[in-house]
Amino acid sequence: MPRQPRIAIVGGGIGGLAAALALERRGAETVVCEQAGALSEIGAGLNLTPNAVKALRALGLESAVNGIAAETNFLNIRSWKSGRYISRTRRADFRQRFGAPNLSVHRADLLEVVAGALQATTIRFGARCVGVEGGARVASARFADGSAIEADIVVGADGIHSAVRESLFGADKPRFTGCICWRGMAPADALPADIDAANGLMWMGPHGHVVHYPVRRGELLNIVAHVDSDAWTEESWTHECDVSEVMTTYAAWNPALTKLYRCSERWYKWALYDRDPLEKWSVGRATLLGDAAHAMLPYLGTGAGMAIEDACVLAAAIARDGDDLGAALANYERLRVPRTKAAVLGARARAKENHLASPWARLKRDIKFALRERFGGEDTTAFQVGWLYDYDVGRELS
Ligand SMILES: Cc1cc2nc3c(=O)[nH]c(=O)nc-3n(C[C@H](O)[C@H](O)[C@H](O)COP(=O)(O)OP(=O)(O)OC[C@H]3O[C@@H](n4cnc5c(N)ncnc54)[C@H](O)[C@@H]3O)c2cc1C
């Protein structure tokens, strides 16, 4: 019987842990090397589109995720100042249309579910990777403390500033998108009456948009406010700031939002970056996964979903081509590169349309959304992302 492959995963975020789970379920020996001293996630929300929920189903986590998630029946788009409803996209029928609902979760809750399902994976903490070599038969990773690890495959799941990516493909800085955002989290029982906390809401205005949706079974409301600005370029997800910054930026927007901002005890801000899509993810036996491979803007709410899909496909490819791991990585890339590239570019396109400044351009856009909702077409999702939601990684692998 052939030996089970040894896989070293650099990065213990959602993508890295999902990969460890998918791989150990298929019998691989897995080790996760995480730079931090413990597994942790920021206090922010994550939208899980139907394709992401199907990927979690493929990992056997759907019911655990249902237990921590909120399901929203509508994605409503409102006008920034008047609060007028531009469109209301039904999500309640996503189960019938796409085979899974749209869910939203607290990031820390999701990480806990994935980490809690791991049984055979070893996690090395304090392991900051500084370089990876992908050879024809093995790959190795070096760490800041001078240690090294060798494995049949090394997977770089180390996020947007991936050291593995830089090591394999050279320095290529993430692209600042000219957009910054603030995020907050408010208890659902303390919200202003004119805020619909049961659904996904998007307020579209000139040079910015604001999104809020429930997480943690509806107990909390996740709020993310985006604006075009180059006044801040730090990408840290944990830079705390004062609510007054948010209030000042959105002073001219609908008063319901001003009231909402006050409900979050803490506010954080960060600059948004993405990367140009890579055509190739692997060098020898080393490859990439998640944001390391395809960091994207958050406007399709699917970066983490794509990382979870990557995890499922990588594990299946390795299980299928176990005696030719080079072929397995080639298959993984072939299946993942086109889809993730479409998501990166789709999210970029949304950035432009979300932040239109000219009143005429906004009016045209709003009419388009309103007509789409009322008369639909084949794809009645607000942002024409049926192609994204329809994908079922379980079907791909069968
Ligand atoms: C504002 C915003 C909103 C978003 N909203 C959504 C959403 O609604 N839905 C969605 O699906 N996605 C969303 N995303 C995208 C999502 O957050 C990412 O796609 C997802 O976190 C990627 O997971 P990952 O595991 O690849 O990387 P990360 O979550 O970044 O994890 C990387 C891990 O690697 C570790 N690491 C880093 N460098 C090293 C190193 N050198 N050595 C060892 N370990 C290392 C880190 O400590 C971390 O644990 C959003 C992103 C942003 C910025």
Image (cartoon, rainbow, N blue to C red):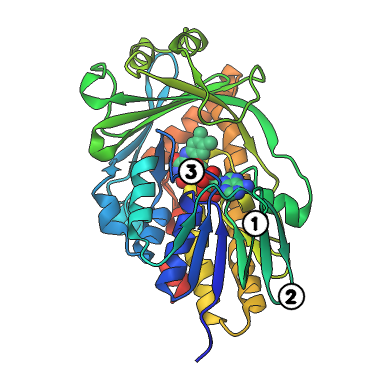
Can you tell which mark lies on residue 136?
2
Query: Which of 89/31 is in front?
Result: 31
Q: Which mark is residue 147?
A: 1
Q: Is residue 303 visible?
A: no
Residue at the image point whose x is 54% and y is 68% from the top: 314
The spot of residue 207 in percent (x, y) is 58, 20
Q: Amino acid at mark 2?
A: Ala
Residue drawn at (41%, 34%), measured in percent from left and top? 44
Q: Quadrant of residue 392?
A: bottom left
- Comes first in the chain, label 3 or label 2: 3
Type of amino acid under label 1:
Ser
**How much space separates mark 2 and mark 1, taking CA atoms?**
22 Å
Q: Nearer the viewer, mark 3 or mark 1?
A: 1
Residue at the spot 62% in from the left edge and 39% down from the top edge: 348
Secondary element type, mark 3: loop
The quarter of the displayed image where residue 286 is located:
bottom right
The residues bearing labels 3 and 1 have C-alpha atoms spaced at a distance of 16 Å
Q: Nearer the viewer, mark 2 or mark 1?
A: 1
Which secondary structure, mark 1? loop
Outermost residue to the bottom: 1
Q: Residue at x 52, y 11 (%)?
A: 249
Q: Please provide percent x and percent y for residue 386.
A: 46, 53
Image: 260 above or below 374: above
Quadrant location of the C terminus in the rendered image: bottom left
Q: Residues within 10 Å of mark 2 (few under 14, many from 20)?
A: few
Residue hosting label 3: 37
Amino acid type of disc 3?
Gly
Count of marks placed on residues: 3
Sooner in the amino-acid sequence: mark 2 or mark 1: 2
Mark 2 vs ligand 1: CB under 8 Å? no
Q: Earlier in the sequence, mark 3 or mark 1?
A: 3
